[in-house]
Each structure stands twice: as C-alpha cells, then as structure tokens.
C-alpha cells in the first residue's frame, strides 16, 4: 500500500523522530521546518555544524520505492536533503540501541554507523553552492558522491508555490526529478535494501513540506 501523509497536523507526525534542533509548525496544509538552535550553535550567518537536524518518518519501507513530496523554500540560504534506504551498517534498524546516538551533526550520518543514500537539493549553504547549483546523491558510510545534476529550484524569494520532488529507487537504479524534470540517474552496483526515510535541513533554511507519498514498486 502507498504511504500517504499530508503532514498537515500534529497527529500526522505521530511516531516521527527528531534528531537535532527541529522547529515544527503546521500551516498552509503542511509542515514548516526550521532550526531552533541557540546562538551558541550558530555562526555570524546563522549557520553552524550543530544547528542542523534530521526528521525521520516512523515507517520502514522496502527496497524498491518511489518517494514524492511537495517542497517550497520559504527563507534562508541553507540546504535540504532526503535520506532513504537508511539502516545501520550491519543491517540493523536505524533506531537499534547498538548504534551510536545521533544529534543532527552531519558526520554521524555520512561517516558513522549509518548505511544510506542521501540526495541534497536547494544547496545554498556555502557561496560555492550558490554560484554553481547542483543536486547531489551520496552513499554512506563514506560520503561517496555517486551522482550529480543541475538544481532548478529558485531562491525562496522567487519560489512560485510548491515543487514536486521525486526519488525513485528500483533494483540497481536511482532517479531524481523535480516537477517531472529528470535531474540525474544512478546505477548502483551494490544496491541498498529497504530502510527508513528522513528529511534533513541545514540552517538557516526555512522550508515547507506537504503531501508525502511513498509507493512500493514491483
């Protein structure tokens, strides 16, 4: 069965797991996420390595899925990301107590005891990312950049409504698209299996999400 979640009310987030300083508001039929990090965690531009967060869906999904959601950047030059097929490196559930605690600090996810794919989009955290905008697919552990494509999303002040973001993972192949514009594909010689999905944001981005759907693929 397809998992559908409008993300529109607190009851839609029952069982979701926050790692890091996640600020949550419901408005306009969806979910607004922002960082609640205090000043000690931020630099002069509102960023900081401990100001970011990950927000995990409580479901465990199979290996072959399509993940889609509506996304709109509202403010700030940060970064948005989706983790998918996330487990422990030994195949454990992502929340197995044998795994190291996670607090939203990025190295815990890309070079720790987590096995996952993660696609980053709306990459605006650093000046180099704003100068030449790409969407990146990485495989962890190891922070391996395995695919890259152009980023068509506008800055928050130019956003025109929501954009439909879509990740497809089927067999050895991963594809990424925004508003049905194909941005990259990746053929994984050692594909990951099933696991969890989670939204990640890097401060100071404020963004809106709604209409999450995860569809199993035969």
Image (cartoon, rainbow, N blue to C red):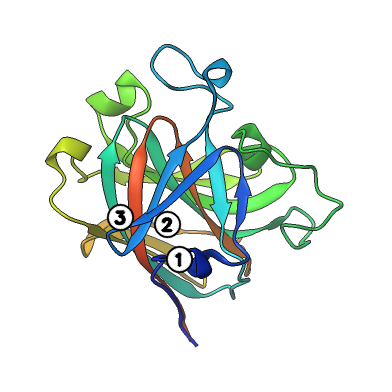
In the rendered structure, find residue 121 and report the number of the disc placed on it: none
Foreground: disc 3 or disc 1: 3
Question: Which residue is drawn at the image coordinates 49% and 69% (left, top)?
Answer: 12
Instruction: Give the SS element for disc 1.
Output: strand
User: Is residue 18 visible to us here?
Assistant: yes
Work out how far the residue at label 1 is from the one at label 2, CA to CA, in angstroms: 6 Å
Foreground: disc 3 or disc 2: 3
In the rendered structure, find residue 71 and report the number of the disc placed on it: 3
Q: Position of residue 57 (x, y in %)?
A: 56, 63
In the rendered structure, find residue 186 and report the number of the disc placed on it: 2
Q: Position of residue 79 (x, y in %)?
A: 39, 37
Instruction: Give the SS element for disc 2.
Output: strand
Instruction: Give the camera-side residue of 16 and 119.
Output: 16
User: Is residue 155 visible to us here?
Assistant: no
Report crowding for label 1: few under 14, some 14 to 19, many 20 or more residues within 10 A (C-alpha).
some
Decide which of tag 3 and tag 2 comes sooner along the chain: 3
- Residue contact between numbered discs 3 and 1, judged by CB atoms under 8 Å: no
Residue at the right extreme, as displayed: 98
Question: Which residue is drawn at the image coordinates 12% and 40% (left, top)?
Answer: 158
Instruction: Give the camera-side residue of 97 and 191.
Output: 97
List the residue tagged with mark 1.
173
């Amino acid at each position: 069965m397809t998992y559908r979640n409008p993300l529109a009310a607190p009851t839609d987030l029952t069982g979701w797991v926050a790692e890091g300083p996640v600020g949550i508001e419901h408005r306009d039929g969806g979910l607004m996420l922002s960082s609640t990090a205090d000043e000690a965690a931020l630099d002069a531009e509102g960023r900081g390595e401990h100001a970011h967060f990950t927000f995990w869906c409580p479901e465990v999904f199979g290996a072959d899925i399509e993940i889609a959601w509506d996304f709109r950047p509202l403010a700030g030059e940060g970064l948005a990301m989706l983790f998918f097929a996330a487990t422990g490196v030994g195949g454990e559930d992502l929340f197995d107590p044998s795994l190291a605690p996670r607090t939203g600090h990025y190295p815990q996810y890309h070079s720790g005891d987590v096995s996952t794919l993660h696609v980053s989009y709306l990459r605006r955290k650093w000046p180099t990312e704003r100068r030449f905008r790409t969407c990146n697919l990485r495989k962890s552990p190891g922070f391996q950049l395995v695919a890259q494509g152009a980023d068509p999303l506008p800055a928050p002040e130019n956003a025109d409504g929501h954009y439909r973001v879509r990740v497809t993972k089927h067999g050895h192949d991963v594809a990424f698209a925004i508003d049905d514009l194909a941005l990259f594909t990746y053929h994984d010689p050692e594909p990951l299996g099933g696991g969890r999905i989670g939204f990640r944001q890097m401060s100071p981005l404020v963004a809106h999400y709604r209409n999450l759907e995860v569809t199993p693929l035969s």
